[in-house]
Amino acid sequence: MLWALLLAGLTWLSVRNDPPTVREQRTLAEAVPVVERAVGELVRAAGTAGLLELGPARVSAGCRVTPLADGARLRREVGVLAPAGTERTVLTAIADRLPATWRAGVGPGLDGPELRADAGEFVAVEGRPTGDGRLRLTVDTGCRPPGAGYEPAPATAAGPEAAALTAALTALNRPADGAPELVTAPCPDGTLARTARSAAGSGPATASALAPLAGGNPLLDNPPVYAYRAGDATVLAEFGPDAARVAATVGCPG
């Protein structure tokens, strides 16, 4: 009886004072700051010349933490330039610039080279080619208890990305349908990386309208994807049969 009471007391103290030791004990809300910092580190590692776009946070509910408990997962993506044949080189350069504690490395994957890293707190980082001159870097919490859930940071005032986006939409003669979506991530130096994204109205559009803004030197011209530099921003356009999606991005220093 005494031993049982002692064991129960030790268990209570452990639950109360010890940090969680598996992902299933850490909530999605607790992982949000880790995810945001990880995105900023990926943006810095990609460099201003290679960064194409910040993806918005996406929360998926309905996964199972345990057979008896529902959970949710949070994912964010970063799009990076990687012309055909350079994918491994670009991934390796990014891995080399990530924090040493992440233990980032590049190895073979099912569809080409893959970057894998551990951002801490059971947050995984992966990167792989998309097959169209780009890489997709993903930060993923995995399934975990929602906790307080995810609350996106409020939008901040417009920067150079907004002017670059407006110029692109004007060139396409497709005024935006409403205010553009603004996505941000905290840079390691305390500034913000920013992407302004908008659908360019309805009707077909082509990259030729953006060629003058690219000065004849696009970063990526792989239909239906087109990208170029505009001052401090990178503009990425994806053309579909009925509309174009346009994003302008400013990255992190260093």
Image (spheres, rainbow, N blue to C red):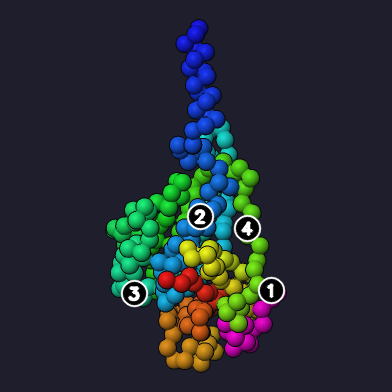
Q: Given the image, on which type of amino acid does mark 1 rest? A: Ala
Nearer the camera: disc 4 or disc 1 = 4
Give the mark nearer the N terminus: 4 vs 1: 4
Nearer the camera: disc 1 or disc 3 = 1
Read off the residue under disc 3.
84
Residue at 58% across / 47% down in the picture? 29
Disc 2 from disc 1: Cα separation: 26 Å
Disc 1 crowd rating (10 Å Cα; few below 14, some 14-19, many 20+) is: few
- Which quadrant of the rendered structure holds the C terminus? bottom left
Left or right, 114 with respect to 178, comes to left
Disc 1 from disc 3: Cα separation: 34 Å
Q: Is residue 50 visible?
A: yes
Q: Which mark is residue 179?
A: 1
Read off the residue under disc 4.
152
Give the mark nearer the N terminus: 4 vs 3: 3
What's drawn in magenta, residue-wise? Answer: 164-179
Q: Residue furthest right?
A: 178
